[in-house]
Structures are given as structure tokens and as C-alpha cells.
Image (cartoon, grey):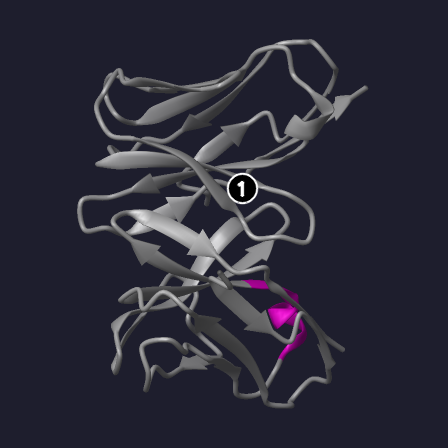
Amino acid sequence: DAGITQSPRYKITETGRQVTLMCHQTWSHSYMFWYRQDLGHGLRLIYYSAAADITDKGEVPDGYVVSRSKTENFPLTLESATRSQTSVYFCASRLAGSQYFGPGTRLTVL
Amino acid sequence: TQLLEQSPQFLSIQEGENLTVYCNSSSVFSSLQWYRQEPGEGPVLLVTVVTGGEVKKLKRLTFQFGDARKDSSLHITAAQPGDTGLYLCAGVYNNNDMRFGAGTRLTVKP
């Protein structure tokens, strides 16, 4: 009954470094999402995927890259981290209109 | 600019009090969802409302969708410390795009 797992849970990195946040689901839901959560902004969609090998931009995609070679995994990569990307990142999957969120990754970019 | 405005942003009450939080938008939604998020965890879906004027009850929580499907309210009766958390509304558009409000942070003191 693992559901959605995210790793790492906490990450500190430096400006300019590449960082990959991992997301894994055990349900085989088709849709998966990446959000960032910042004070005053709520949850904002970064990228989403309707199925393996199908991805699309969300509200705030700049500076992020995603891939989905397998249904169960949806990694998010920050190619060159910036301080403005300090945030809490949530992965989610969706089935029949209900979204299921992972526990989040708290990323700090120094 | 937040498409979904939630009010109040913060609410601190004593155990046993009643409260209402609001979610407003100028957009019409095909459905609206309410989530509750506890510290260090991802949001958890509480309810989905679909029909204008719809009212749903979940124990001491009452959710209402506005007649025009642009707004919603969450009423909690006899709040308990276990109700403490961040309450998020999310509006779903016809194309399945979903946008979240910034949330209402509720603290219920014993």
C-alpha cells in the first residue's frame, strides 16, 4: 500500500547544479503531475503526463525538465538550479478525477 | 494573480467553535475539490462537488458548491484540534485543467 513515494524528502543544493527529484507510484495511474508549493501561491503545476512518453507543460515549466519512460516513474529535473526554485515539490497521480499526492520533497537552493 | 481566492488566509479558533472558509473565483468550474494538508505531508482529497448548489457532508464538515459553480464554502461544526491543517480548494476546468487556491491555514486550540 505504498501509493506515491518521492525521493529525496529533503535536498540542499547550490545554484547552477543539476538536481533530479524522483517520483514513483504503485497504482499504474495514467496521469501524473508535478507541483511546487510556495507561501502565498498555493500549488502550481509544473508539468504533467497523460501516459508513458507523453508529457506537457503546466503553469510554471521554465527551468524544469521531465520524462516518463515507464508508467510508474515521473522524475523532475532542474537542469541548472536557481534560488527561485527553492520550494516544496509534490508529485501526484490521478484516477477518475481524484488526485493522490506524495509526501513532498523540500528543496533548498543556496 | 491567484485564479482561486481563499479566505481567510489564517484562522485560529478554540475547540468547539464553528467556522466557515471560502473559495471564490470569477471562473466557472466543471467541479471543485477540497483538500486538507498536514505539515510535512501532501494534500489529501476530502470531497469533490460537481453540481451547482450541491451540498456534501463529511461528518462535521459541510461543503457547498455555489449555484453558478464559481465559488464554494467549507463549514466545520464544533471544530476539534484534529481539524488543524491547511485547507485547499481546487477548481477543475472543462479541459481537466486544475488550479489550486493558496489555502486557509486553520489552527484549533484545545
Left or right of B80? Residue A52 is left
The chain to which mark 1 is attached is B
Query: Relative to B60, does residue A62 appear above or below in the rendering?
Result: below
Residue farthest toward the right in the current orientation of the protein:
B110
Residue A11 in the figure: left or right of residue B1: right
Q: Amino acid at mark 1?
A: Ala
Image quarter of the C terminus of chain B: top right
How many marks on residues? 1
In the image, residue A88 lies in the stretch drawn in magenta: yes
Would residue A41 be found to the left or right of residue A39 on screen?
A: left
Taking the spot 55% from the left edge, 49% from the top edge, the residue there is: A41
| Residue at the farthest front position | A1
Judging by the rendered image, the residue that carries numbered circle 1 is: B102
Residue sitting nearer the eye, B67 or B87: B87
Q: Could you classify mark 1 by the number of other residues whose Cα lies within 10 Å: few (under 14), some (14-19), or many (20 or more)?
A: many
Residue at image x 54%, y 41%? B102
In the foreground, A89 or A99: A99
Q: Position of residue A73 (x, y in %)?
A: 41, 78
Image quadrant assignment for residue B27: top left
User: What span is in magenta?
Assistant: A82-89
Q: In the image, is B7 to the left or to the right of A17?
A: left
The correct choice, above or below, for A5 with respect to B31 in the image is below
Q: Position of residue A22 (x, y in %)?
A: 52, 78
Tell me where residue B76 appears, x and y as whole percent. Answer: 55, 16
Residue drawn at x 26%, y 15% is: B53
- Identify the element where label 1 is drawn: loop
Q: Is residue B101 magenta?
A: no
What x and y, as percent, mark residue A7? 60, 75
